[in-house]
Amino acid sequence: MKEKARIMDAQAMGRAVQRIGYEIVERNKGTENVVLIGIQRRGVPLSQRIAGHIDRVEGTTVPVGCLDITFYRDDLSLLSEHPVLNGTDIPFVITGRDVVLVDDVLFTGRTARAAMDAVMEVGRARTIQLAVLIDRGHRELPIRADYVGKNVPTSRNELVSVRVAPFDDEEAVVLLDANEGEN
């Protein structure tokens, strides 16, 4: 796929993560009841970075977990006969907590809906909030993010690629043309 534009470099991503961390602390009046859960795959390192920022600024450790939503997706039968599982690890009680789900891109809202279903099976959170690095629009469900690193209006034939370690060789957010190569 052809790269159309660089939306964020590593520094811009870092600033967005810091801002999201500040906003989480402000909205929740501290961190006492807050837990972060990264949605597999790229939401996990982003949630760890947000937690690290909060720890540096507030001096408190926010629990971080990871969530695999594979079996909660409404398109599971379309994915593959043998979907790849990345694992869920939530080593804390979520009942009564303020859960912040963290993902890289908010698009149709279906991933966020699946993540909320998965969290509700684990326990009864006091609140479920959503933090995303990129909100690209095109919602199919009435879902909005509480914390957004950057709003990026896109067309449906574009893709937003969030590149983060340990999955990628660079730290960047790139806009790709999904129709490249089609005639």
Image (cartoon, helix red, strand yellow):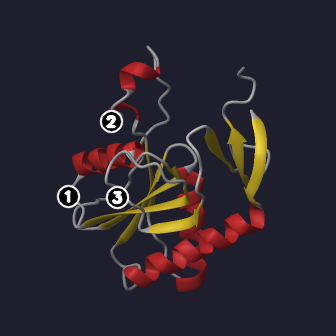
Label placed on residue 92? 3
* Residue at 69% over, 50% down: 164
- In terms of depth relative to the viewer, which is nearer, 88 or 91? 88
The kind of residue on which mark 2 rests is Tyr
Residue denoted by label 1: 124
- In the image, residue 110 sits, relative to residue 23, either above or below, namely above
Give neighbour class at mark 2: few <14, some 14-19, many 20+ (Cα, 10 Å): some
* Residue at 36% over, 34% down: 73
| Residue 3: percent from left, percent from top | 78, 42
**Mark-to-mark CA distance, 2 and 1:** 17 Å
Q: Earlier in the sequence, mark 1 or mark 3?
A: 3
The kind of residue on which mark 3 rests is Phe
- Classify residue 18 by image quadrant: bottom right
Left/right placement of residue 53 relative to residue 73 reads right
Residue denoted by label 2: 72
Q: Earlier in the sequence, mark 3 or mark 2?
A: 2
Looking at the rendered image, the disc whose residue lies closer to the viewer, 3 or 2, is 2
- In terms of depth relative to the viewer, which is nearer, 106 or 20? 106
Is residue 131 among the parts visible in the rendering?
Answer: yes
